[in-house]
Amino acid sequence: LKDMEVIQDQLKFLRRNLRKPEENPASLAAIQEMQRASVACKAMDFPMAEAAEGEAREKLITGYKLEMIEMIESMLQMERALLAGDNDAAREIYKTIKAFEESGHEKYTDEGI
């Protein structure tokens, strides 16, 4: 779960930093760290899947991995926007990533129960 905390911490950092183009190098470093942590999280087991069995378990795991892939793709889009100097687009993409985080916690952790 340490990698999940990394993602949350970097999102908090980006919420403030994406408004400041002069901070783009630090924002890009944060996105790199989020991507690394997300790839690690995609492979991890999570309590709801461990508690499920059979087809329900497989469906949970597949759904989780697909959402993580979509979130990583959004991070790549954010990185592309920042590299192009488009902080407005990066801030819009931030909202998408934040929504993935919230819906993922609702669906795949006991936070949603």
Image (cartoon, rainbow, N blue to C red):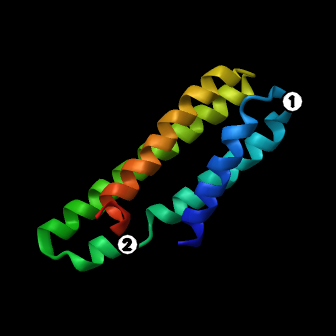
Residue type pointed to by label 1: Glu
Please state which of residues 39 and 21 is positioned toward the viewer in this rendering: 21
Q: Secondary structure at mark 1?
A: helix
* Label 1 sits on residue: 22
- The answer to whether residue 36 is seen in the rendering is no
Give the x, y percent position of residue 71.
Answer: 47, 45
For marks 2 and 1, the one nearer the N-term is: 1
Give the x, y percent position of residue 99.
Answer: 44, 41
Count up the numbered dots.
2
Left or right of 90 in this view: 27: right
**Vertically, is 13 above or below 85?**
below
Q: Label 2 vs label 1: CA separation?
A: 38 Å
Residue type pointed to by label 2: Phe
Are dots 2 and 1 in contact, CB under 8 Å? no
**Vertically, is 30 above or below 4?**
above
Q: Outermost residue toward the right?
A: 22
Residue drawn 62% across and 53% down?
34
**Vertically, is 35 above or below 21?**
below
**Which label sits on residue 48?**
none
Residue drawn 59% across and 71% down?
2
**Which label sits on residue 46?**
2
Q: Secondary structure at mark 2?
A: loop
Q: The C terminus is located in which quarter? A: bottom left
Q: Outermost residue toward the left?
A: 55
Residue drawn 80% across and 34% down?
24
